Amino acid sequence: MKLTKGLVMQTYSIGTCPSKVIKSACLLQCPDGYTMTIRNKDEWKIIAHAVNQGIDSHLEALTARSSFNSTTGECIVHPEEIHVLLRRFHDSGEDAAWSLRSDILSTLDIEEI
């Protein structure tokens, strides 16, 4: 484990980080929502696919508490919903989605290898 931002980075196997760990990290570090600006069209396709699924087999969804604006590239993911977005990235089976998931998790001091 390595130290970043004064916190111990948590390491998991790919796709195994528990939802409660992701939510807790997001609530701690960005209680008003996880913000990002996406300029890459391919990443927007990944996000759109994840957002547009509606309620999934886990009976969870990305709701109006989160916002995604493809015109400006701005995203704000509610801390209680970030795990849904990241799970959908993993479930897609696409390398680009896994990479985006990994990038987001690393900003939350979580590593998947």
Image (cartoon, rainbow, N blue to C red):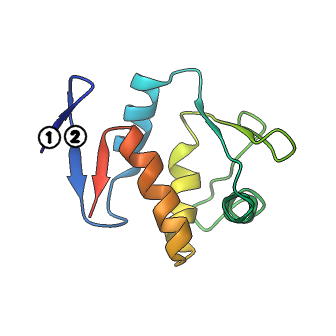
Residue 8, image x, y percentages:
18, 34
Which residue was labeled with disc 1? 2
Residue 48, image x, y percentages:
76, 59
Residue 107, image x, y percentages:
40, 39
- Quick check: 50 left or right of 18? right
Q: Can you say which quadrant of the picture contains the N terminus?
A: top left
- At x 31% / y 39%, what residue is drawn? 109
Which residue was labeled with disc 2? 9
Q: Can you say which quadrant of the picture contains the C terminus?
A: bottom left
Residue at the far left in the pictured view: 1
- At x 61% / y 68%, what residue is drawn? 57
At label 2, counting other C-alpha atoms closer than 10 Å, the crowd grade (few under 14, some 14-19, many 20 or more) is some
Q: Amino acid at mark 1?
A: Lys
Residue at the far bottom in the pictured view: 93
- At x 38% / y 33%, what residue is drawn? 24
- Quick check: 72 left or right of 8? right
In front: 30, or 18? 30
Mark 1 falls on what kind of element?
loop
Which label number is shown at residue 26? Answer: none
Mark 2 falls on what kind of element?
loop
Q: Residue 106 occupies which quadrant of the picture? A: top left
In the image, is residue 81 above or below residue 5? Answer: below
In front: 8, or 20? 8
In front: 113, or 63? 113
Q: Residue 25 occupies which quadrant of the picture? A: top left
- Find the distance from the CA under tag 1 to the CA under tag 2: 5 Å
- At x 59% / y 28%, what residue is drawn? 33
Kindly check if marks 1 and 2 are in contact, taking CB atoms under 8 A apart as contact.
yes
In the image, is residue 4 above or below residue 88? Answer: above
Q: Amino acid at mark 2?
A: Met
- Quick check: 53 left or right of 8? right
Residue 105, image x, y percentages:
40, 47
